[in-house]
Image: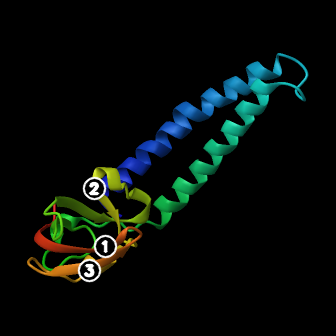
Amino acid sequence: MTRAGATALEAELKTLKSVERPSVIRAIAEAREHGDLSENAEYHAAREKQSFIEGRIKELEGLLSLAEVIDPTKLSGAIKFGATVDLVDEDTDEEKTFQIVGEAEADIEKGLLNIRSPLARALIGKDEGDSVEVKTPGGEKCYEILSIRYV
């Protein structure tokens, strides 16, 4: 996991524990005051939200306890975890930039590519100027690696 990914997960965990958890506890207490719990939609919704929050807290604590934080700025050479890669689609000439990150911090919309994705697996070990072929759900894609940075 990158430092940025670990920091984001730590911030989410802190928010869940210090803001969301107390808020849902208050909502449950208020809903209990309305009487009969068997037909109290507010109570059931608050309990469901509490269940989700507690599950997410456990998930984040588990991820963070097992995470190995890697500083990409100390890396160099061929593509590996943490690399920021500029690619060009050989068919459409569309340029894309991705950083290869861990599963927990991946967000394709932000250019954070899951290391287990087909594209990341194809890129690992390659150098600038290399071409890679990737089988995607939309068919086979060919990319040329324009540059590799570790930031």
Q: Is residue 133 above or below residue 46?
A: below
x, y percentage for residue 98?
Answer: 24, 61
Where is the C terminus found, in terms of image quarters? bottom left
* Marks 3, 1: nearer the viewer: 3
Q: How many marks?
A: 3
Q: Which residue is mark 3?
A: 133
Label number found at residue 35: none
x, y percentage for residue 62?
Answer: 54, 61
Residue 49 vs residue 106: left or right?
right
Label number found at residue 111: 2
Q: Residues within 10 Å of mark 1 (few under 14, many from 20)?
A: many
x, y percentage for residue 138?
Answer: 38, 67
Q: Nearer the viewer, residue 148 or 130?
A: 130
Q: Residues within 10 Å of mark 3 (few under 14, many from 20)?
A: some
Q: Regarding mark 3 in the picture, which secondary structure is present there?
A: strand
Q: Nearer the viewer, residue 44 or 109?
A: 109
Q: Is residue 9 above or below residue 20?
A: below
Which residue type does callout 3 highlight? Answer: Glu
Where is the N terminus found, in terms of image quarters? bottom left
State the image quarter where residue 124 is shown: bottom left
Q: Earlier in the sequence, mark 2 or mark 1?
A: 2
Look at 82% across and 17% down and name the residue there: 33
Q: CA distance from mark 3 to mark 2?
A: 19 Å
Is mark 3 in CB contact (under 8 Å) with mark 1? no
Which residue type does callout 1 highlight? Answer: Ala
Q: CA distance from mark 3 to mark 1?
A: 11 Å
Residue 150 vs residue 65: left or right?
left
Look at 72% across and 32% down and name the residue there: 45
Q: Which residue is mark 1?
A: 120
Look at 58% across and 49% down and name the residue there: 56
Look at 22% across and 83% down and name the residue there: 125
